[in-house]
Amino acid sequence: MQRVIYAATAFRATATPAIMRAVVVSEPAPAADFSKVKVVDDYPVPTPGEGQMLIKVAASSINPVDWKIMESAHWPAVPGFDVAGVVEELDETNCSRFKEGDGVWADLGKGLGSPHIQLGAWAEYAVADCSQVGLKPESMTFEDAASLPLAALTGYQAFQMVGAPWANNATHRENLTVVVTSGSGGTGVIAIQLAKAYGAKQIITSASSRNADLLRRLGATHIVDYHESTIWDILEDDSVDIIYDNFGAPGTADAAMRSMRSNGEFIFLPGKGGAVSENPKKGVVQLDFGLCDSSNHEDLDQLKDLVDAGLLRAVVPESHTLNNIQDVLQSSVAGHAVGKIGINITALAEFIV
């Protein structure tokens, strides 16, 4: 695929339309029944308010939370967390960091966990608060950039909670060992790279053997084939400093305690029944990550710097358009995607700006 660099202002050729192509969830979609998820061609283009911008969307991506929240009562609305595109319109007074035509990225999940969640990325246009939007990494296409915000913010904020960057933290050992419980999914491929960038020397994860080479290139030093064993079967006692349980299965904390050092930290992503151990090793700190905070662009700016420094890259081996959104959602539910499944929404997706 040829990646072409264009001037940002070249993308604004016509007036903003009144209607757009968009995915609409008409009512709750229980148990991964996506019959209520449709693509329409006449959805009203949203209007940005005070402190907001309208983004011409180039690309988005699929996160498991995208279809999990379809079971709840936030509908009818346009779904989608991850967005990359260009600034179409903005409140110039309150959005002085940006100008029309800038390439931007964001996680539109502001308000996650409340009835007022934002969303709207799976459409040709989306509204975002300028405070939560960052300038897109200069070295990335829109498609690659759209695969990162939610997963990367989650990993970034989780590792911040356990002391990253560890290379600059005197309280952690020099030979820091980090476990990422699930390596090849959207949060895993990011966490491995962040752990390496932040100074971990040993990065241990679990994945199918077919993905081992990819994960080693990203920074993993040991990959356990989950078809043959578990991480906890192969780890020595008192050998791990930090466990990032991005899978969050029940019982993981209990199984992990033997391998943790007495000053170790265990942090897990909720949602699959994971929890802290009721019998932790003395001295081990246990943390429930909770929900990703997408409200502060400064976190995205930190991630942009890592991308542009060559320390963080996207893994998007599979991409689609809005036309087959139901099939894409079913593929995500099946749980076999490596990295992220991309969604190309306009012709900008392949470009760098």
Image: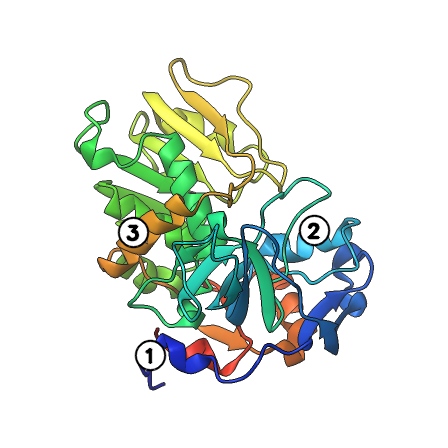
* Residue at 43 percent of width and 58 percent of height: 148
Nearer mark to the viewer, of 3 and 1: 1
- Say which residue label 2 marks: 69
Q: Position of residue 226 (x, y in %)?
A: 46, 51
Q: Is residue 138 left or right of residue 350?
A: left
* Separation (CA) of disc 1 from disc 2: 37 Å
Q: Amino acid at mark 2?
A: Ile
The crowding category of the residue bearing disc 3, from other C-alpha atoms within 10 Å (few below 14, some 14 to 19, many at least 20), is many
Q: Amino acid at mark 3?
A: Ala
Dot 1 or dot 2: first in sequence order is: 1
Q: Position of residue 279 (x, y in %)?
A: 51, 17
Element type where label 2 sits in the image: helix
Element type where label 3 sits in the image: loop
Q: Are marks 1 and 2 in contact (CB under 8 Å)?
A: no
Q: Is residue 36 above or below residue 17?
A: above
The crowding category of the residue bearing disc 1, from other C-alpha atoms within 10 Å (few below 14, some 14 to 19, many at least 20), is few
Colour scheme of this structure image? rainbow
Residue sitting nearer the eye, 154 or 110: 110
Residue sitting nearer the eye, 222 or 331: 331
Q: Is residue 74 left or right of residue 344?
A: right
Residue 337 visible in image: no
Q: Are marks 3 and 1 in contact (CB under 8 Å)?
A: no
Element type where label 1 sits in the image: loop
Dot 2 or dot 3: first in sequence order is: 2
- Say which residue label 3 marks: 220
Dot 3 or dot 1: first in sequence order is: 1
* Separation (CA) of disc 3 from disc 1: 37 Å
* Residue at 16 percent of width and 31 percent of height: 174
Q: Is residue 30 left or right of residue 179?
A: right
